[in-house]
Image (cartoon, grey):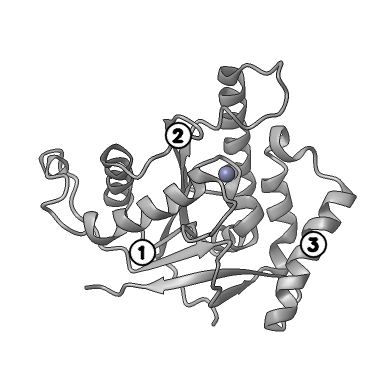
Amino acid sequence: MTENITEQDIIMVVTPHPDDSESSSGGTISKWCAQGKKVILVVCTNGDKGTSDRSVKPEDLAATREVETLNAAKAYGLSDVVFLRLPDQQLEDNDEFREKLVRQIRIHKPRLLLTHDPNKPYIRHRDHSMTGRVALDAVFPYARDHVAYPEHLEEGIEPHKVEEVWLFRPEEPNHFVDVTDYFDTRQNALHSHVSQVGERSAERDERSRNRLVETGKKYGVELAEQFHRITLGRK
Ligand SMILES: [Zn+2]
């Protein structure tokens, strides 16, 4: 139950909204970046519905959130950010969305893909479950099989086999990462999303830390994040 990631790893993080990964797995992403791994973030929607302020124009919010995402990427040290700019709250398990994720997987060739757990019952954000579901399908079998989206081959984009998928906010956690040394970077990345979570403060840091401490207790470390880890291997 510890991480076994090698130096040359490429990791892809797939989220519907710009700030989804920070609160669930920001310590882990910070750690990966500090270890020199190549981490690519794919943000699926433009996030233009993420406000309760009626005076904010959706197009202005979308622009703000891209800047915030790039600031978070800088705080982490991400290698790349891809904005798919699909409509917020309208992701569907369909061919259009799947093709876009297959394309990114085939272009960037991650060994490990991190995304939402699609299996949350009852109350959940629909974009989150759609993203998890479509990303898992994109990994297997679509990105692997040359017959899926054959137009990619004509563009010189080759099939790719992802070896591992990690799901954050898991229904059934089976893996953890010790993030004790990465709290500060995590918080800097999280609070880059000012429009969503406000500026960083001692009070907010304490709330965040308490959640990580709770998870850490489960695994005997100071601060931890947990995942559902699926190993596909090289088949
Ligand atoms: Zn979200």
Tell me what residue is drawn at x 44 percent, y 30 percent.
85
Q: Which residue in the protein does label 2 denote?
A: 90
Give the amino acid at mark 1: Arg
Query: 10 Å neighbourhood of mark 3: few (<14), some, or many (≥20)?
Result: some
Tell me what residue is drawn at x 62 percent, y 26 percent.
64
Earlier residue among tags 2 and 3: 2
C-alpha separation, residue under disc 2 versus residue under disc 1: 28 Å
Query: Horizontal placement of 52 versus 129: left or right?
Result: right
Earlier residue among tags 3 and 1: 1
Q: Which mark is residue 188?
A: none
Above or below, 119 against 192 in this view is below
Label 1: element kind:
loop
Q: Which residue in the protein does label 3 denote?
A: 209
C-alpha separation, residue under disc 2 versus residue under disc 3: 33 Å
Give how far across and how far down residue 41 sits, in percent. 48, 47
Q: Which residue in the protein does label 1 denote?
A: 111
Give how far across and how far down residue 168 sits, in percent. 55, 61
Q: Residue furthest right?
A: 203
Residue sitting nearer the eye, 166 or 109: 166
Label 3: element kind:
helix
Give how far across and how far down residue 169 sits, in percent. 58, 61
Give the amino acid at mark 3: Arg
Query: Horizontal placement of 208 versus 76: left or right?
Result: right
Disc nearest the viewer among 2 and 1: 2
Disc 2 C-beta below 8 A from ligand 1: no
Above or below, 137 against 67 in this view is below
Query: 10 Å neighbourhood of mark 2: few (<14), some, or many (≥20)?
Result: few
Q: Quadrant of the C terminus?
A: bottom left
Residue sitting nearer the eye, 127 or 83: 127
Give the amino acid at mark 2: Gln
Tell me what residue is drawn at x 68 percent, y 54 percent.
186
